């Protein structure tokens, strides 16, 4: 039986870091949402979204205890249907993951592992996320 994303119940958004240089002002860094086309409207214009649904599995047991000792809170494993643009960003750029689609520090996670294109089958992505405790 092939692995699949069974319970796509958690809304997540992804953002990549972009630095732009403005002459006379210097560099500014912003976080731009990753958007993908989900189809076309009646005029042939792409319909874009930055919302993705995934299976969010919180860590528990020895793994979670060890990570909490290292200052990591709320570690989790994320499984999401394969999206090429998302996979490329996860493999090559600094990416933030926002749980429940809320873009703020309380819902922001960072990657704790590389993204895995499960069995190189282009059907599912799997990766680990973490959130550091702020003291």
Image (cartoon, rainbow, N blue to C red):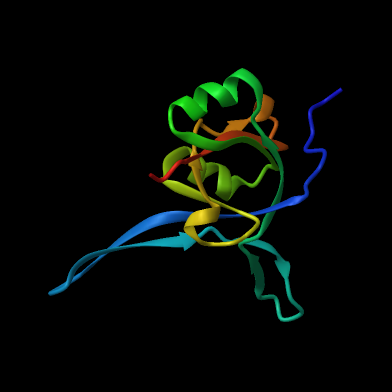
Give percent across and percent down for residue 64: 58, 26
Quadrant of the rendering where the C terminus is positioned: top left
Relative placement, left or right, of 91 versus 29 is right
Q: Residue furthest bottom?
A: 43
Q: Which residue occupies the foreground of this view, 46 or 113?
A: 113
Q: Could you say which quadrant of the image residue 102 lies in? A: bottom right
Relative placement, left or right, of 61 versus 71 is right
Which residue is depicted at the point 43% across and 41% down?
A: 92
Q: Which residue occupies the foreground of this view, 24 or 74?
A: 74
Relative placement, left or right, of 53 versus 89 is right
Q: Which residue occupies the foreground of this view, 123 or 131?
A: 131
In the image, residue 115 above or below residue 8? above
Give percent across and percent down for residue 106: 52, 55
Give percent across and percent down for residue 55: 73, 42
Give percent across and percent down for residue 66: 51, 21
In the image, residue 20 above or below residue 7? below
Which residue is depicted at the point 46% across and 25% down?
A: 69
Q: Residue furthest left?
A: 24
Which residue is depicted at the point 44% across and 54% down?
A: 16
Relative placement, left or right, of 107 versus 77 is left
Q: How many dots with numbers?
A: 0
Q: Residue furthest top?
A: 62
In the image, residue 40 above or below residue 135? below
Q: Which residue occupies the foreground of this view, 101 or 85?
A: 101
Q: Residue furthest right?
A: 1
Quadrant of the rendering where the N terminus is positioned: top right
Q: Could you say which quadrant of the image residue 134 lies in? A: top left
Which residue is depicted at the point 71% across and 81% down?
A: 43
In the image, residue 42 above or below residue 103? below
């Amino acid at each position: 039986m092939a692995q699949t994303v069974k319970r796509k119940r958690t809304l997540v958004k992804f953002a990549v870091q972009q630095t732009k240089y403005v002459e006379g002002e210097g560099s500014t860094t912003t976080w731009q949402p990753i958007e993908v086309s989900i189809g076309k409207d009646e005029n042939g214009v792409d319909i874009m979204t930055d919302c993705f649904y995934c299976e969010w599995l919180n860590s528990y047991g020895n793994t979670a205890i060890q990570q909490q000792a290292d200052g990591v809170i709320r570690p989790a494993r994320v499984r999401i249907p394969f999206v090429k643009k998302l996979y490329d960003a996860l493999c090559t750029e600094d990416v933030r993951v926002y749980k429940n689609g809320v873009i703020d520090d309380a819902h922001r996670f960072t990657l704790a592992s590389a993204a895995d294109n499960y069995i190189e089958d282009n059907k599912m992505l799997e990766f680990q996320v973490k959130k550091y405790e702020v003291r």
